[in-house]
Image: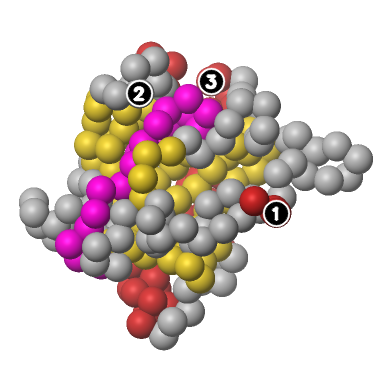
Amino acid sequence: MESAILNAPPALAPAALPRLIDALVEQGWYVGEDVLDAALCQELHAELMARAEHDALVAAGIGRGEEHALRRDIRGDAIQWLDRESQAQRRYLAAMGELQQALNQALFLGLFEYEAHFAHYPPGAFYRRHLDSFRGRANRVVSTVGYLNPNWPADGGGEMVIFDAIDPAREVARVRPEAGHFACFLSETVPHEVLPTRLPRASIAGWFRRNASLGGLVDPAR
């Protein structure tokens, strides 16, 4: 199976990497179209929708550890962590490994791990404005979102809105959740939200982490 991954077309468009790195340096975020391989998006979308149809996803919460809570007034998606079970998952994670290496080589970020989950938003679901990490409290450094929805209509909703890191009230980008689109941003400084979706919305959210282990414990635990 690993040979099939090696022989497959690039999951992440190589031409996107220099633009992604430059954008992270210049503005703290990147959005690109047709970045993810179309066939891979189709496979991942089918996998996620099958899980959703069989109630194999878990309602997503906010906070971690003792602070974890389900708040449908803040976040309405259901998730499942990627576990390398399918070849499509392995291809996606291999591509993120290549991105991790490129970020470390270019920006010396010291990224050591990547975690990601499927995210399914049913019609009407949203995720209010938030940061993926807080300074000094977690080790998520760079966030990624890969979109899997084929032929997303202009009135489908579900866009991710990215806000300015210095002026959080100012919108700087709006990402339509179309298959192949890919977003990447600094976890600690870039606020973002998901607008209410009119259709079932499928994506993969992920985070590159820096090693903040202490006494054999990873901070924070997933």
Taking the spot 44% from the left edge, 82% from the top edge, the residue there is 55
Amino acid type for the residue under numbered disc 2: Pro
Q: Marks 1 and 2: in contact by CB < 8 Å?
A: no
Of callouts 2 and 1, the N-terminal one: 1
Taking the view exactly as shown, the residue that stands out farthest to the bottom is: 54
Q: Residues within 10 Å of mark 2 (few under 14, many from 20)?
A: some
Residue 54 in sight in this render: yes
The residue sitting at the right extreme is 215
Q: Which residue is mark 3?
A: 106
Give the spatial CA distance, label 2 vs label 1: 28 Å
Q: Is residue 62 left or right of residue 184?
A: right
User: Considering the numbered disc 1 on the image, is that residue within a helix, a strand or a loop?
Assistant: helix
Q: Position of residue 189 (x, y in %)?
A: 48, 25
Q: In which image quadrant can residue 119 be found?
A: bottom left
Percent coordinates x, y for residue 66 in the rendering: 70, 54
Mark drawn on residue 168: 2
